[in-house]
Amino acid sequence: MKIAVSGKGGTGKTTIASLIVRYLLSKNRKPILAVDADPNSNFGDALGVKVDSTVGKVLDGFLKEKENLPTGVVKESLIDYKLAEILVEEKGFDLLSMGQGEGPGCYCYPNTVIRNYIEKLASNYKYVVIDNEAGMEHISRRTNGSLDLLLLVSDPSLKGVRTCKKLEDLVRELGLNIKKTYLLINRVPKELPPQITDEIERLNLNLLEVIPEDQQVVDCELRGIPMLNLEDSTPAVIKLNEAMAKVIP
C-alpha cells in the first residue's frame, strides 16, 4: 500500500508522515519503506534517522562518472547498486531520501532508472509512506503516478485549504492513478472556524480528520526528538491514529 502526504508548505506534512509511520509500526504493519521526496524536508530527522546521502547525490555522481566507466559496466546495475547503498535500514522501516540533483546535465535516463528501482524496491514492503513537496509532478516521475492513498495537509486557513484543492485538481490533470484522496487539517487550536468548514464543503474536499495543535509535538520538533517517541496519549497521535484506522484496512 502506497501512502503519500502533500500540501502547502509549513503545514506539518513531515510530522503527519512520521506519525503515519508510527501508527503502522504500532500495528505491526511491517516492513515499511519511508521515502523523503521533499528536498526541503527533514523526514529522516522526524524519524530519528541519520541520512548520509541522497538519490540526488547518486545522480550527480553518476553523471560525472559515466563517461569514464570501463567497457562492459552496465550503467543501470551501477545505479541500482549505489542506490542500495544509501538506503537507511532501521527496525521495522527503511528510509530512502530523494534530495535533488545539483549538477548540470540531463537527468532523464537516470530518473527513469530510479523510478524503476523504487518500483522494484517498494515490492519488498507492505507499506510505502512518501513525504512530498507541494507539487505532484514528481509522483508521476518517480512512482509511476500510482498511489493507494493521498493525504493533502492544510493548516486551518483558507489559503491552505485552497492550495489542497489546487493539488487535487493537478492530480486529475496529470492523470495520476490515485485510489483515494483525503484532506487533513493540521495544527487546529480548538475547532475549525465556520469559514474553513464552509470552504471545504464549497470545494468538495473530502475531510478525513482534524488534527489538534499539540504542544508535545512542538516540543519534539524544537528539541530534535523523533516523532516515533511520542506517547500514545498525545492528542495529535490519538487523532492521527483515528484517521488512519478509517482508511488503512
Image (spheres, rainbow, N blue to C red):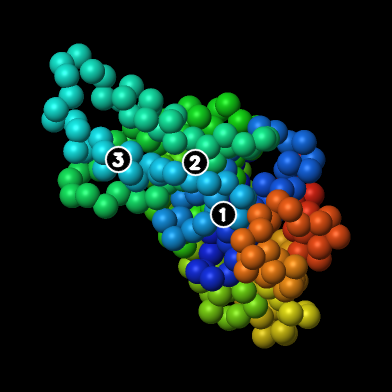
Disc number placed over residue 59 in the picture, else none: 3
CA separation in Å, label 3 and label 1: 23 Å
Which of the pair 19/158 is nearer the observer? 19
Q: Residue furthest right?
A: 233
**Could you tell me which residue is drawn at 22 percent across and 49 percent down?**
103
CA separation in Å, label 1 and label 2: 13 Å
- Per the image, label 3 sits on a secondary structure element best described as helix
Q: Mark 2 — residue?
A: 96
Q: Mark 1 — residue?
A: 45
- Per the image, label 1 sits on a secondary structure element best described as helix
Q: Are marks 1 and 2 in contact (CB under 8 Å)?
A: no
- What kind of residue is marked 3? Leu
- What kind of residue is marked 2? Leu
Of the two numbered discs 3 and 1 on the same chain, state the one appearing first in sequence: 1
Can you say which quadrant of the picture contains the C terminus? top right
Location of residue 135 in the rendering, given as x and y in whole percent from the top left corner: 43, 60
**Could you tell me which residue is drawn at 38 percent across and 27 percent down?**
80
Up/down of 175 relative to 125, above or below:
below
Q: Quadrant of residue 237?
A: bottom right
Tag nearer the camera, 1 or 2:
1
Q: Is residue 233 left or right of residue 24?
A: right
- Per the image, label 2 sits on a secondary structure element best described as strand
CA separation in Å, label 2 and label 3: 14 Å
Which of the pair 105/210 is nearer the observer? 105
Q: Residue furthest front?
A: 223
Badge 1 crowding class, 10 Å Cα cut-off, few under 14, some 14 to 19, many 20 or more, is some
- What kind of residue is marked 1? Asp
Can you say which quadrant of the picture contains the N terminus? top right
Of the two numbered discs 1 and 2 on the same chain, state the one appearing first in sequence: 1
Location of residue 71 in the rendering, given as x and y in whole percent from the top left corner: 15, 16
